[in-house]
Image (tube, grey):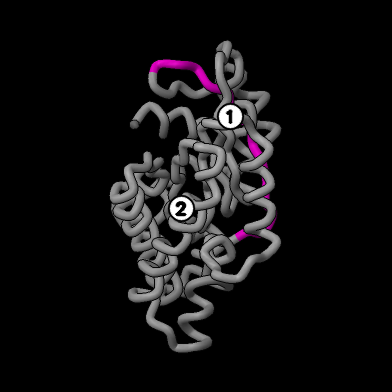
């Protein structure tokens, strides 16, 4: 990430009049201090990490450290801020989250993802309401199946379907709540449902240029 920052100083040089807070797990690192244009105004991305947080943690009915952290951050920033929330990628991995529950407990992910996404959005909207923050949802990138053995076709197919469904429901739920949606899946997916390898800089993380491109698509 530091290398990409040094190679692309143009992403950071534009003068920004306002800030957009990007709260996520490690995916918040890459776009830190990148400048994006939103509604005709230059905004600097100010990143905040909630390490290891899943959408599942934020969707839970039981208060946990991840919800408390998000509540703390949202309470600390100025009222009526623009906030991008980027959770869900950890939920959509082969070894944990949705697929692990699917295999360990025989719970059909086709049914569970819709409820997970709805509960996640209901929770974050509720937490943002006291500060009257404008919430923007950031999706999950297309799967970088280079992380999986080439012969592991079953897991590749399952992973691709889980990520596709998660983004589909996230977009639908965002629209139903009149929230903007940054469709990073559409930006990063190839015709075969895997990463197009134009934006990944490692197994999971994306190039800093992703956020400006996504905001230009709104």
Position of residue 107 relative to residue 90, above or below, is below
**Residue most toward the top?**
15
Evaluate whether residue 58 shows in this view: yes
Please name the residue shown 50% across and 88% down the image: 105
- Measured as percent of width and height from the top left, residue 218 is found at 34, 31
**Residue annotated with mark 2:** 140
* Numbered tag placed on residue 45 in the rendering: 1
Please name the residue shown 53% across and 53% down the image: 87
SS assignment at label 1: strand
- Magenta-highlighted stretch: main secondary structure? strand
- Measured as percent of width and height from the top left, residue 108 is found at 38, 81
Q: Give the number of the mark in front: 2 or 1.
A: 1
Evaluate whether residue 190 shows in this view: no
27 vs 178, left or right, is right
Q: Residues within 10 Å of mark 1 (few under 14, many from 20)?
A: many
Which quadrant would residue 6 be assigned to in this image? top right
* Residues tagged 2 and 1 counted as in contact (Cβ below 8 A): no
- Measured as percent of width and height from the top left, residue 117 is found at 42, 62
Position of residue 198 relative to residue 139, above or below, is above
SS assignment at label 2: loop
- Measured as percent of width and height from the top left, residue 10 is found at 56, 17
Please name the residue shown 37% across and 39% down the image: 180
Position of residue 213 relative to residue 71, above or below, is above
- Asked if the stretch drawn in magenta spans residue 166, the answer is no
Start-end of magenta stretch: 40-53
Closer to us: 148 or 215: 215
């Amino acid at each position: 990430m530091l290398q990409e920052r040094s190679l692309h100083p143009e992403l950071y040089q534009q003068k920004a009049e306002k800030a957009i807070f990007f709260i996520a797990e490690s995916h918040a690192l890459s776009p830190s201090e990148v400048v994006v244009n939103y509604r005709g105004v230059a905004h600097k991305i100010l990143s905040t990490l909630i390490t290891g947080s899943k959408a599942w943690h934020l969707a839970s009915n039981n208060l946990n450290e991840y919800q408390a952290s998000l509540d703390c951050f949202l309470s600390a920033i100025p009222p009526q801020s623009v906030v991008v929330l980027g959770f869900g990628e950890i939920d959509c991995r082969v070894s944990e989250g949705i697929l692990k529950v699917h295999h360990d407990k025989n719970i059909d992910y086709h049914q569970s993802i819709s409820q997970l996404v709805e509960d996640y959005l209901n929770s974050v909207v509720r937490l943002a309401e006291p500060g009257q923050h404008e919430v923007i949802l950031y999706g999950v990138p297309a799967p970088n199946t280079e992380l999986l053995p080439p012969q592991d076709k079953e897991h590749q197919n399952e992973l691709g379907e889980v990520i596709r469904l998660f983004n589909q429901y996230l977009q639908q739920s965002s629209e139903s709540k009149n929230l903007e949606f940054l469709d990073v899946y559409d930006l990063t997916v190839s015709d075969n449902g895997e990463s197009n390898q134009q934006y990944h800089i490692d197994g999971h993380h994306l190039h800093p240029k992703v956020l400006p491109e996504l905001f230009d698509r709104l």
